[in-house]
Amino acid sequence: MKTGTYQIELGDTFSDILKQADGEKELGNFYQSAVETYIYDNPEVFYLDVNKMYLNIEKITRGNNITYNVFINSGDEANYLENGYNIQIINSRLSEIRQAKEEIKAKAVGNTYEDIKMVHDYIVENTEYDSTLSLPDIYNVYGTLIRKQSVCEGYAKTFKLLMDELGIPCVIVIGEATNSNNETENHAWNYVQINNSWYAIDATWDDPVVSGGGTARPASKYKYFLKGMTTISKDHFAKTNFTENGKNYEYPTLNSQDYEI
């Protein structure tokens, strides 16, 4: 898929669905949900532009027998890669990301709390929030890990990427949040599991740049670190669907109280 032109063959797998009333619409909904799930579960696949990926349905009639051939490709687009990407650039950037992951992973000590804190601190201390929303790769892991500039989606995807690398369960959460100026904005953060319970982490809002620049006090640096539902629900409001009319996802249930060491 890194070529951007590879055709994904699904064959007649969905013929039974497509024979039903509104089958094409139902398969389209399944496809949208599958793509969303894939992208948010695999933040290292930063180079795909899902808006350039098309689900194609061919109806095949042989006598009384009707089947459907389904495949995914780039349609009339040259490819389904993000603008500016090709396989050489992708492989080069994946190599840079792999090296960064190994360097961060080498700092892990095997204690879940300490490793979560290490990754949180690394992201907060090494990433500058792009308030202009104009720099390249700010929505993906390359912008955060290599360019060191990102926005909330990049922070959240990178946190998940590194948690996955360390084998610590983690999900990306999409929704809205109300900032210190009482302004509600679209936002992304994470839920992470420790000691069989789930807690919220918002590395973006723990970044001192976001809260006005300078060096954050230790307390503010961890204002959104391993928080329970009672705390995080005061200003973070999760949405169960990532896109309009998309699948409604079920997030892990947060512990009601903040994590205590």
Image: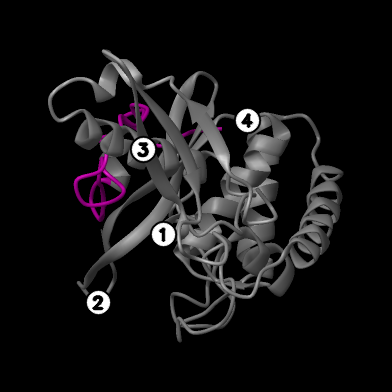
Callout 2 amino acid: Asn
Disc 1 marks which residue? 51
Q: Please tell me whether mark 1 or mark 2 is closer to you in this view.
A: 1
- Rendered image quadrant of residue 66: top left
Taking the spot 67% from the left edge, 49% from the top edge, the residue there is 119
Q: Is residue 11 left or right of residue 145?
A: left
Give SS at disc 3: strand
Disc 3 marks which residue? 57
Please check the rendered image and state whether residue 98 is part of the magenta-colored stretch, yes or no. Answer: no
Q: Earlier in the sequence, mark 4 or mark 1?
A: 1
Is 254 rendered above or below residue 1? above
Q: Are marks 4 and 2 in contact (CB under 8 Å)?
A: no
Q: Please tell me whether mark 3 or mark 4 is closer to you in this view.
A: 3
Disc 4 marks which residue? 168
Callout 3 amino acid: Ile
Please check the rendered image and state whether residue 256 is part of the magenta-colored stretch, yes or no. Answer: yes
Taking the spot 55% from the left edge, 33% from the top edge, the residue there is 9
Disc 2 marks which residue? 181
The image shows residue 245 at horizontal and vertical percentages of 19, 46
Chain part drawn in magenta: 233-261
Q: Earlier in the sequence, mark 4 or mark 2?
A: 4
Callout 1 amino acid: Asn
- The alpha-carbon separation of the residues under discs 3 and 2 comes to 49 Å
Examine the rendering and report whether any part of residue 226 can be seen: no
Examine the rendering and report whether any part of residue 108 can be seen: yes
Predominant secondary structure, magenta span = loop
Q: Are marks 3 and 1 in contact (CB under 8 Å)?
A: no
Q: Earlier in the sequence, mark 1 or mark 2?
A: 1
